[in-house]
Amino acid sequence: LRRRTFPRARFSSLAETFYASIMADDGQQVVAANDNGALVIVAKAIGPTTPKKATAWFLWLLGLYIMLLARAPVEITEEMHNKYMEVMEKARDIDVLRTPVMMKIKEIDAEIYHHTRGIPFMWRFDHRKEVVGSLYQRRDEKMVELQDINYEIEKVHSEAKSELGIWSNRGIEEAREKFWEKLDAGKSFAKRQTLWDAIISVLFNQRRDEEAFSFIVRWIFTIAFNFTIGFFLTLINFMFSLIYVVRSFQPTFISGLFFYFLALLGAASVVLGYLLLTCGLAGGGVYVAYKTVSVNHRLHNRRRYAIREHQD
């Protein structure tokens, strides 16, 4: 059998028609006199037909690339790595000071538990008030000392990361890790909210005669709404958390601002993708539920009609 080849001129004609239909500015339907009409209709349905829509598609795809695939524009050289390690040695020297302070806090906590037996507030009304009160005061002093040490360590870490730069692999990965952390928190919020909705529905729902289709649709939209709220909370939390990530690398104002908006564009693109996926799953679930209920309803009517004919 001879292998059937696709003519190059034919392919060029199809590609030109598809591209022209995507980049058309007038938004009107292109009428094809030949068999390219189906391709034009598909291109008009899924492709951007206006400059604004094309820009939105470009920004969305750019954001996905930035958050998921983009490599760091600045490579960490051996010299940068050596400077980073030199500064981190200072952080290790300061970190040694935390151990005795934390041990002292644990000793004070053990003494407090010995006097209170883990029962809060009751010691305020008897002879233990002065002893436990002094222990809490000593604990607060040690906590202030521990916070000062942690602040010094954070300053040294920030100085070390400034040797690498916000545009290095360390800065890119830290921003991505912060985003995925907030995204997991948003999905956990949606799961908890859905669980509470289910508990409240079981305890206080009085609609015992609710049809199966309406019940399924109601829960599909409930779950979709909870995940939508969770994704919006993800984006809001990431907006504020990203500020501290950028500041920790001590970039210039222009560089930090540019990095912040690019990272925010990537986060918004991923969140938008999750929202589109959620809406698609919700719509698909409603469609499947509708088709299932319709088929069951038709089968039920056929049985009733067959029974009537048999009785007649």
Image: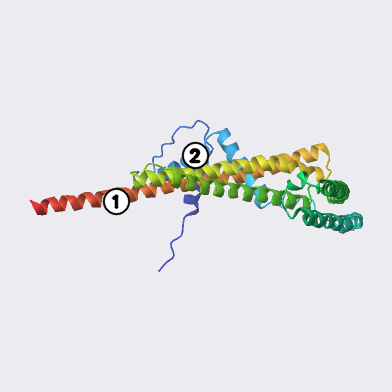
Question: Residue 42, can we see it?
Answer: no
Q: Is residue 59 left or right of residue 214?
A: right
Of the image marks 1 and 2, the number of the one nearer the N terminus: 2
Residue that carries the numbered disc 1 in the rendered image: 295
Tell me which residue sits at (43%, 41%) in the image: 41
Helix, strand or loop for disc 1: helix
Q: Position of residue 150 (x, y in %)?
A: 85, 50
Q: Position of residue 28 (x, y in %)?
A: 46, 32
Marks 1/2: CA–CA distance: 39 Å
Tell me which residue sits at (48%, 44%) in the image: 200
Quarter of the view holding residue 234 = top right
Amino acid under disc 1: Val
Quarter of the view holding residue 272 = top right
Image: 101 above or below 144: below
Q: Looking at the image, which is closer to me, 243 or 137? A: 137
Q: Is residue 48 left or right of residue 211?
A: right
Q: Position of residue 226 (x, y in %)?
A: 53, 43
The outermost residue toward the top is 26
Residue that carries the numbered disc 2 in the rendered image: 21
Pointer 1 local density, CA inside 10 Å: few below 14, some 14–19, many at least 20: few
Q: Quadrant of the N terminus?
A: bottom left
Which marked residue is nearer to the observer: mark 1 or mark 2? 1
The outermost residue toward the bottom is 1
